[in-house]
Amino acid sequence: MEYIILTETDFFRRINEADNHNELHPAYRDFTDKVIRLCIEGMDIHRAILALTYAETELQFHHKLSENEANSISGLYIRKALAFVRKTQKFLTPQVSPLSTSTPKPKTPQPENTLRWTGKASDLVEMLYGMVEMGCINGGEMSIGELSAFFYSLFGVEAKDCYHIYSDIKLRKNDSRTYFLDKMQEKLNRRMDMDEERERMGK
């Protein structure tokens, strides 16, 4: 799928395995070439922007950008790739045509992001993995990486990548490791019981 074309490059493999300028520079050049081809070889611009958003998220939350490794050679090349992707996004965004041709209404100042995830990042990841397992997004054709990139961006979440969080969730010792989903189920069933009770009282 177009969403992952940029993260299947040799660059992403090498930043995990090497800390050598001579190996990383050609991989970085190959990555930037793929970004350029993605933008000029006729791909639908909306798909290109979504692919870049996915690559940006994978770069932004890569473990090599942690505090201890940010100054390594790998960290340097991740920052360079991230900067290049973001500049490319800015170049593409003005080219996206509006969905409507009607006369635009005067704009009212809006906050940059009106939706914020105020729960734990692990709660969101539980839901995302649940949706993937249920196959309820795009008929089950959307990967967890694509889904997390979309929702992290939508809700302005800055956290470890979903794979790291999922690994932590699997280490939980309780009989049920899905703390958030279990609590959600409990609260929703309680609400329906209370609604039914109020309806009976109102008759």
Image (cartoon, grey):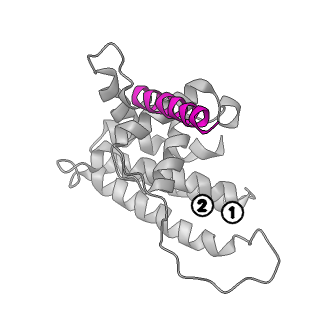
Residue type for callout 2: Ile
Residue at the (51%, 57%) spot, across then down: 32
Secondary element type, mark 2? helix
Within-10-Å neighbours for mark 1: few <14, some 14–19, many 20+: few
Q: Is residue 152 magenta?
A: no
Give the position of the N terminus as an image quadrant.
top right
- Front-most of residues 87 and 9: 87
Instruction: Give me the residue at 74% from left, 72% from top.
Output: 98
Residue 77 visible in the picture:
yes
Q: Position of residue 109 (x, y in %)?
A: 53, 81
Where does residue 172 sit, x and y in percent of width and height? 28, 21
How many marks on residues? Answer: 2
| Picture disc at residue 40 | 1
Q: Nearer the viewer, residue 69 or 138?
A: 138
Magenta region includes residue 190: yes
**Quarter of the figure with the C terminus:** top right
Query: Residue under circle 2?
Result: 36
**In the image, which residues are magenta?**
182-203
* Distance in Å between CA atoms under marks 2 and 1: 6 Å
Dot 2 crowding, Cα within 10 Å, few <14, some 14–19, many 20+? few
Q: Badges 2 and 1: C-beta atoms under 8 Å apart?
A: yes
Quadrant of residue 171 in the image?
top left
Q: Which image quadrant for residue 36?
A: bottom right
In the rendered structure, the answer to whether residue 108 lies left or right of residue 73 reads: right
Secondary structure mostly seen in the magenta stretch = helix
**Amino acid at circle 1:** Ile
Q: Residue 14 lies in what quarter of the image?
A: top left
- Left or right: 83 as drawn, with respect to 133: left
Query: Can residue 34 be seen by looking at this rendering?
Result: no
Q: Which residue: 50% across, 50% down? A: 55
Q: Which residue is the extreme one toward the top?
A: 175
